[in-house]
Amino acid sequence: MYVFGVIIEAPYEQALARVKEALGAEKLGLVSEVNVSGILKAKLGEDIGAYCILGACAPALASRVIAAQPAAGALLPCNVVVRALNEASTAVDFMDPVTVLGLAGVPEVDAIAAEARAVLERVRDRLTS
């Protein structure tokens, strides 16, 4: 599977703030924040509910991936999707770096991907504690 996740019993805005805080607590930087729901509303007139993609990056891990396989930078950063399920619940889906970086086919990158997954699992666990 290319994602793993959790459902948070919190409204979207509160959950989004909690995700950002949990990412920061694990020393992951946010390199992008895409308001997908706003884009689809503005460009297509579609209302999909609150939906955001956060691009999370651990610079030390990203540097190692790029050093091992420069083209693997196309597989970075790790995306985290935060999406409203209803007024009281929010889903958080984490891109599985093991699956995605496995596309590089480089054992050293695979090992780094496992480290990145462990970091994202700690983020997920922070959201459920």
Image: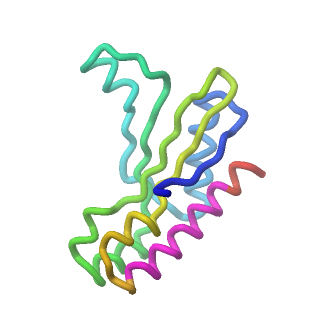
Is residue 119 inside the magenta stretch?
A: yes
Which one is in front, 81 or 110? Answer: 110
In percent of width and height, residue 27 lies at 54, 64
Residue 87 drawn above or below residue 55: above
Which one is in front, 99 or 41? Answer: 99
The answer to whether 80 appears left or right of 31 in the picture is: right
Q: How many marks?
A: 0
Residue 17 in which image quadrant = top right
Residue 93 drawn above or below residue 117: above
Which one is in front, 20 or 90? Answer: 90
**Residue at 62 percent of width and 62 percent of height:** 121
Q: Residue furthest top?
A: 45
The answer to whether 55 appears left or right of 126 in the picture is: left
In percent of width and height, residue 96 lies at 48, 60
**Residue at 49 percent of width and 26 percent of height:** 50
Residue 86 in which image quadrant = top right
Is residue 41 inside the magenta stretch?
A: no
**Residue at 59 percent of width and 63 percent of height:** 26
**Residue at 57 percent of width and 38 percent of height:** 16
The answer to whether 80 appears left or right of 65 in the picture is: right
In percent of width and height, residue 109 lies at 38, 79
Q: Residue furthest front?
A: 1
Q: Residue furthest right?
A: 129
Dominant secondary structure, magenta = helix
Residue 84 drawn above or below residue 63: above
Please give the range of residues in magenta.
Answer: 109-124
In percent of width and height, residue 65 lies at 34, 77
